[in-house]
Image: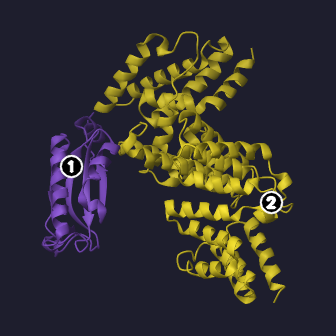
Chain colours: A purple, B yellow
């Protein structure tokens, strides 16, 4: 089963560049990446640029609205993600627990819907 | 032959958890297993009435449940994952004798998988409690709803959502490995203890469900001990429940009002049950792997050992609360430690420490009751009345409220 790990954190709480903790923190990500890849569970993953680079779109009543900023202003912001292919939730949790943000932020572990073409056909009444 | 329906009912009552656990293992989905097993039982009612009890009734039920599951999967339009489940089931179905030793009716005991899954931390606690009661204890949805004072439809929805989450999130049907063991066992023990407390605390609602919940919790505790021999915290939990329950006849007065431990008639304590609890906790502590449930059981055992309230070994209890606080960091434990301190050293220091917990425990009734009692002991009658009024306002049941009002009246009479 594929799981997305959504990495939320308050950027002020993360180790800051230039501090001794920062090296450990970056090292933690390097180790996680290595382990995910070596164990064959890594499907994809990336850090996101901060929410200051974010733009949010909505179309309402035919009008496309483009706004500066993330979809919601929250203290903990989405900072990155992985998609991991794991046997079950416990395996996904074990890997997600290696992500350094778990120590000061929150990591949401959610399965991908992985809708099968056959199921889609059923839903569309074409089966 | 009319013995069959009674025998079937008795079998289902005793073996539901074990039958369901084995069915989930074979069938792969909790929802499907529960439905299929229920259908198998209905089928047994007809067939066993007609043809008498089969030689291996449990094996029969398991086999028929698997076949019902196969039928259901075939009737649904499926996607890939069900095709795998179907193939696996059909394989199982064709295995002669179902892998059971000939001449016995022993089915595999998968109840550990079942309880660890029901108590997985990805599920909220209330859902875990409800699911455990349904899946392992075989309580009906209506009975579980009643225990929680919920409407049956609400509880039914909760159970469905929990089972859906298990399959949607990929919660495995496994006993956790060593790296997750301590955390997961702790979760299971806490769920069982919640069942016990639902029954024991008598908080709100009519009382008829309560003894049943206590009995189910103790049954689950015994099951865990049987399946996890030598697991000290499981021994601690069972000991704790037995020691608490041994006082059931002394806890309430004729009007259903709570009686404090100090004032209970100890002749009404069930000495046999307490003895079993004491033996268990002694054995558990001897394993040298202490934990919070063992500490709580040890504290309860010290109370049990005291033939009168006056002869209670409070210094020992104080020490044990200290250990428990060290393990858990819980403020509630700290409160209990402070109450024990007052017993050993007098109320003054304890009162000061107790006041310090005010912001954290403002919504916790026993905090205000403890504060009121300590103030009364130091002669601060006005302060005591105030705190008892807070406690009354926060009380969760009629029994509790009446007890606290009695205490309030007693202090007020000193004004």
**Residue receiving disc 1:** A83
Residue A75 percent location from the top left of the image:
29, 73
Which mark's residue is nearer the viewer, 2 or 1?
2
Location of residue B342 by image quarter: bottom right
Q: Would you say the residues marked 2 and 1 are in contact, meaning their CB atoms lie under 8 Å apart?
A: no
Residue B290 appears anywhere in the view = yes
What kind of element bears circle 2? loop
Question: Could you tell me how far apart the alpha carbons at marks 2 and 1 are, in whole angstroms?
Answer: 56 Å
Left or right of B250, for residue B353: left
Task: Using the image, tell me which numbered label, if any, was put on residue B252.
Answer: 2
Chain ID of residue with mark 1: A
Q: Residue at x 40, y 22 (%)?
A: B89
Label 1 CA crowd tier, 10 Å (few <14, some 14–19, many 20+):
many
Label 2 CA crowd tier, 10 Å (few <14, some 14–19, many 20+):
some
Q: Nearer the viewer, residue B302 or B179?
A: B302
Q: Residue at x 41, y 36 (%)?
A: B174
């Amino acid at each position: 089963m594929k799981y997305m790990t959504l990495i939320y954190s308050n950027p002020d709480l993360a180790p800051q560049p230039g501090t001794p903790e920062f090296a450990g923190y970056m090292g933690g990500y390097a180790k996680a990446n290595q382990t995910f890849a070596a164990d064959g569970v890594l499907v994809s993953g990336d850090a996101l640029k901060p929410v200051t680079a974010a733009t949010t779109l909505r179309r309402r009543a035919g009008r496309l609205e483009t706004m500066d900023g993330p979809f919601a202003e929250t203290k903990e912001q989405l900072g990155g993600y992985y998609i991991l292919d794991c046997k079950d939730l416990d395996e996904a949790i074990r890997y997600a627990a290696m992500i350094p943000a778990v120590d000061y932020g929150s990591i949401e572990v959610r399965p991908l819907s992985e809708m099968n073409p056959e199921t889609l056909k059923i839903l569309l009444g074409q089966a | 032959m009319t013995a069959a329906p009674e025998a079937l009912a008795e079998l289902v009552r005793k073996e539901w958890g074990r039958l369901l656990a084995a069915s989930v293992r074979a069938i792969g989905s909790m929802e499907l297993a529960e439905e299929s097993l229920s259908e198998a039982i209905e089928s047994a009612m007809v067939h066993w009435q007609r043809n008498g009890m089969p030689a291996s009734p449990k094996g029969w039920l398991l086999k028929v449940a698997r076949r019902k599951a196969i039928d259901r999967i075939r009737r649904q339009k499926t996607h890939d994952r069900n095709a795998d489940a179907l193939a696996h089931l059909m394989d199982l179905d064709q295995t002669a004798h179902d892998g059971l030793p000939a001449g016995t009716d022993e089915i595999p005991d998968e109840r550990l998988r079942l309880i660890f899954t029901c108590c997985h931390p990805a599920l909220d606690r209330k859902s875990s409690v409800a699911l455990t009661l349904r899946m392992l204890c075989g309580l009906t949805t209506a009975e579980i709803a009643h225990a929680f004072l919920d409407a049956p439809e609400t509880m039914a929805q909760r159970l469905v959502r929990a089972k859906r989450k298990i399959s949607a999130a990929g919660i495995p049907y496994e006993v956790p490995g060593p790296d997750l063991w301590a955390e997961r066992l702790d979760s299971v023990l806490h769920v069982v203890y919640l069942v016990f407390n639902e029954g024991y605390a008598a908080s709100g609602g009519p009382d008829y469900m309560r003894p049943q919940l206590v009995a189910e919790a103790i049954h689950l505790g015994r099951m865990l001990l049987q399946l996890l021999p030598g697991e000290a915290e499981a021994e601690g939990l069972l000991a704790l429940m037995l020691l608490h329950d041994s006082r059931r006849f002394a806890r309430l007065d004729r009007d259903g009002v709570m009686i404090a431990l100090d004032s209970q008639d100890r002749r009404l304590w069930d000495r046999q049950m307490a003895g079993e609890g004491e033996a268990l906790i002694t054995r558990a502590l001897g394993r040298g792997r202490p934990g919070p449930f063992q500490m709580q059981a040890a504290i309860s055992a010290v109370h049990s050992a005291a033939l009168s309230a006056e002869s209670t070994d409070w210094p020992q209890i104080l020490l044990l609360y200290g250990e428990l606080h060290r393990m858990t960091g819980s403020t509630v434990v700290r409160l209990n430690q402070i109450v024990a301190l007052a017993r050993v050293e007098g109320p003054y220091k304890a009162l000061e420490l107790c006041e310090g917990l005010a912001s954290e425990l403002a919504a916790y009734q026993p905090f205000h009751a403890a504060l009121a009692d300590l103030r009364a002991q130091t002669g601060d009658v006005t302060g005591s009345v105030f705190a008892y009024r807070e406690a009354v306002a926060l009380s969760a049941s009629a029994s509790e409220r009446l007890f606290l009002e009695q205490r309030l009246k007693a202090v007020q009479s000193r004004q």
